[in-house]
Image: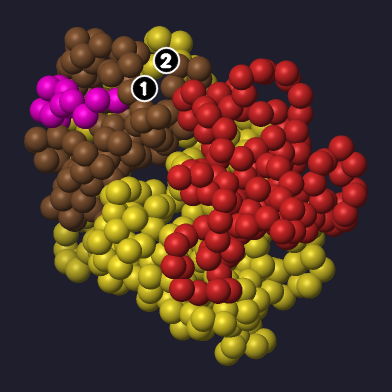
Amino acid sequence: MTSTEHTKAGAKSKARFRIGDRVRVLNMPYLFYSRTQMYVRGVVGTIAAYTYEDLIPEDEAFNLDGKVEQYYIVRFRQQDLWPEYPFPNDTLQTESPERWLEPADESTSTHDKAK
Amino acid sequence: MSSSHSQGDHHHDHPHKAAPTVDEITDFEVLEIAVRELSIEHGLFTAEEHRRFTEWAESIGPAGGSRLVAKAWVDPEFKKRVLENATEACKEIGVDWSEPTGFGTPSDYTHLYVLEDTPTLHHVIVCTLCSCYPRPLLGMSPEWYRTTNYRRRIVRWPRQVLAEFGLILPEEVEIRVEDSNQKCRFMVLPVRPEGTEGWSEEQLAEIVTRDCMIGVALPKPDRKVDTHPIRKARRPVKIASVKEEAAK
Amino acid sequence: MTPETAANRIPILEGIRNQGKTWDVLAPSYGVTNENPPWKTSLVAVCGCLGTSDALPALDIREAEDELADTIYRDVPAPERQLLALAHTMLDRGLVSEHELANRMSKIRSRLEGA
């Protein structure tokens, strides 16, 4: 779905994550609004694609370091996002800047949502 | 003022009737002008910016998207280009995402990704945060797309919401919801339906409606119009009730 | 954090709303088949232009519109709902005053009716 340059593992050498990496969405405090939806916070997904590099929106960062970050498409199983979601094959994707993600270990439970 | 389709003239001895117009000036019309003029006077934007934006808004519609899908269906090399760099590929069908500012609009940007459906993977698009939409390709978003009812429920209950549009898919098919919460904009490239063998691009484009490119409908040889939703939403959402839904 | 828009009714906008002259009713009564009123694209352009301004960034407009659309303008059809919500938000934030708006509307009406 993205450019072949973007989908080659390691092509984006500054990017922290590679396609297929398991990542967890952080749950950071924010002052005004955030583009990281509540329903993905604390949930583990998989890096599906690179999109572009961009600045963090002003409202998202306390320290406006002016650095450019990699953005990713992250894919989640719907059964990991919602309690009692009945269909095991369904997924959801959303876009995230790198600073909202951390590596998730293989052994990490996907139900880490902070309540 | 508004124009409309001519009503036709069945009386040959009368002069041709003018197309009907709404012959009154509503306060809504006046309000829009007032908001615009006051914004310009307060320096929120310039008249020139507004004029350029209006021209762009009048130029867009779903025809571009339909053309792109039809061409991708008949031309595998074009389809490859669409999947590799959709923003560039749009230029081949006459859509330039950098309009009207040279850098795109403040809500469409220039990062288009086309999501390819397969027989076992069906995409549907939403923007839960604010109803972002690939306007340069699809025109203005339909009103239902902008409602909290759609935006909050399609991520949580996609199969139920799709059923309300008349689309029911087998459990084996992966339904993938794409929530466009950042700068990427998405459009669905549906599977080309059976019964369209040998069709021209123009014929194919006719059955690729806006709803097919959002993912709430499948293209069919005899389907040229979007009609929706066909069933009322079950328990239109309030945030609190998401947990109640989960408990049912 | 919820937007600051209070679901307070604004008299001048209530007056406009209560006339009920929305396009979905007006157009058929005149035999006009256009789906949208002639000012709709201009409204889209206003929102688009404001979206780049600091005074009313795009996400703010959207959040405010959502809140108002779910509450006091719930029963108004689109696009009138969008127009009222935008005007409401601008009034709430002090970008224009009710007095200014009323005056300007009256001048515009004279201009259009005198033409």
Q: In which quarter of the image is the N terminus of chain A?
A: bottom right
Q: Are marks 2 and 1 in contact (CB under 8 Å)?
A: yes
Secondary element type, mark 2: helix
Q: Mark 2 lies on which chain?
A: B
Which residue is located at x 19 percent, y 10 percent? C99
Q: In the rendered image of this protein, which colour is used for chain B? A: yellow
Residue C51 screen position, x and y as percent: 49, 27
Q: Mark 1 lies on which chain?
A: B
Which residue is located at x 21 percent, y 29 percent? C7
Q: Is residue B147 magenta?
A: no
Which residue is located at x 53 percent, y 29 percent? A29
Question: What's the amino acid at mark 1?
Answer: Arg
Q: In this view of the protein, which residue sits in the foreground, B229 or A97?
A: A97
Which residue is located at x 73 percent, y 20 percent? A66
Q: In this view, does C61 lie to the left or right of B195?
A: left
Q: In the rendered image of this protein, which colour is used for chain C? A: brown
Residue at which label 1 appears: B36
**Label 1, residues with CA under 10 Å away: few <14, some 14-19, many ≥20:** many
- The correct choice, above or below, for A71 with respect to A43 in the image is above
Instruction: Write down the region rendered in magenta.
Output: C5-16
**Label 2, residues with CA under 10 Å away: few <14, some 14-19, many ≥20:** some
Cα–Cα gap, marks 2 and 1: 6 Å
| Residue B135 seen by the camera | no
Query: Residue B40 bears which disc, if any?
Result: 2
Residue B144 screen position, x and y as percent: 35, 55
Question: What's the amino acid at mark 2?
Answer: Ile
Q: In the rendered image of this protein, which colour is used for chain A? A: red
Q: In this view, does B167 lie to the left or right of A14?
A: left
Query: Residue B129 bears which disc, if any?
Result: none
